[in-house]
Image: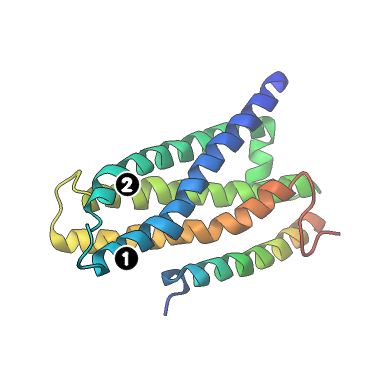
Amino acid sequence: MNPLDSVTGTIISGFVLAVVLAYIAAQVAGA
Amino acid sequence: MEALLPYERWLHFLAGITWIGLLYYFNLIQGQALAAAAADKEGPGGAAITKYVAPRALAYFRWAALVTWLSGAAYLGKNFTGAFTLGIGQHSSYLTNIGFGAWLGTIMLFNVWVLIWPNQKKILGFVQATDEEKAKGKRIAFLASRTNTMLSIPLLMFMGGASHGLPFFAG
């Protein structure tokens, strides 16, 4: 099932992506 | 050019709120309203939404997206290249964070003009399309719209946090 089919799945995916990208950005900025 | 920055920032916020506000309207309200209207056999149906509301909302939506990107690019100015290369080698968390936001916004602009709007023109009957093309276009536009809703969450974190600090891993 695609999480984007539901509003809840979309929002949760957005927050998970935010955490992952924030981690990557912190590594890039500190490199 | 420095003197223009407050105006570019202001325009960027106004257009961005218009764009993302309408994106949330489509994803949180209109889609559900059309589904409820289709399920309500005794009700008036969703034709009025499709005919009178959706085209107007889509017009503000797609043009606001373009103005948001252009005003954002103007605001970045001499930082444009540094942002899109994520500040690598420049030891600038501002460039890295605003760069992640700029890339997310650019992907979202692409989704609006390349995936959502051309397919919405088929769905709403502005251009000729077979039923099969409409069904396929509906799925593509839906997923692109949902993708943008998802991407708007980290986008706003990066855009808002670039000058003020990010949550989670910011030292």
Question: Furthest residue to the bottom?
Answer: A1
Question: Furthest residue to the right?
Answer: B171
Please state the horizontal and vertical placement of residue B61, each as a whole percent of the image. Answer: 42, 42
Mark 2 / mark 1, whichever is N-terminal: 1
Residue found 28% across the figure and 60% down from its top = B138
Residue found 49% across the figure and 43% down from its top = B19
Please state the horizontal and vertical placement of residue B36, each as a whole percent of the image. Answer: 32, 65
Badge 2: how crowded within 10 Å, few (<14), some, or many (20+)? some
Protein chain holding label 1: B
Label drawn at residue B54 = 2
Of residues B159 and B22, which is closer to you in this image? B22
Residue found 67% across the figure and 47% down from its top = B159
Q: Is B170 on the left-hand or right-hand side of A11? A: right
- Mark 2 or mark 1, which is nearer to you? 1
Please state the horizontal and vertical placement of residue A24, each as a whole percent of the image. Answer: 70, 63
What type is the residue that disc 2 sits on?
Ala
Residue receiving disc 1: B36
Q: What element carries label 2?
A: helix
Query: What is the distance, in whole Å, between disc 2 and disc 1 at their CAs?
Result: 16 Å
Please state the horizontal and vertical placement of residue B78, each as a whole percent of the image. Answer: 68, 31
Q: In which quarter of the image is the C terminus of chain B?
A: bottom right
Of residues B18 and B72, which is closer to you in this image? B18
Of residues B65 and A7, which is closer to you in this image? A7
Of residues B51 and B96, which is closer to you in this image? B51
Residue found 31% across the figure and 60% down from its top = B34
Q: Is B6 on the left-hand or right-hand side of B123? A: right
What type is the residue that disc 1 sits on?
Ala
Q: Is B122 on the left-hand or right-hand side of A24? A: left
Protein chain holding label 2: B
Badge 1: how crowded within 10 Å, few (<14), some, or many (20+)? some
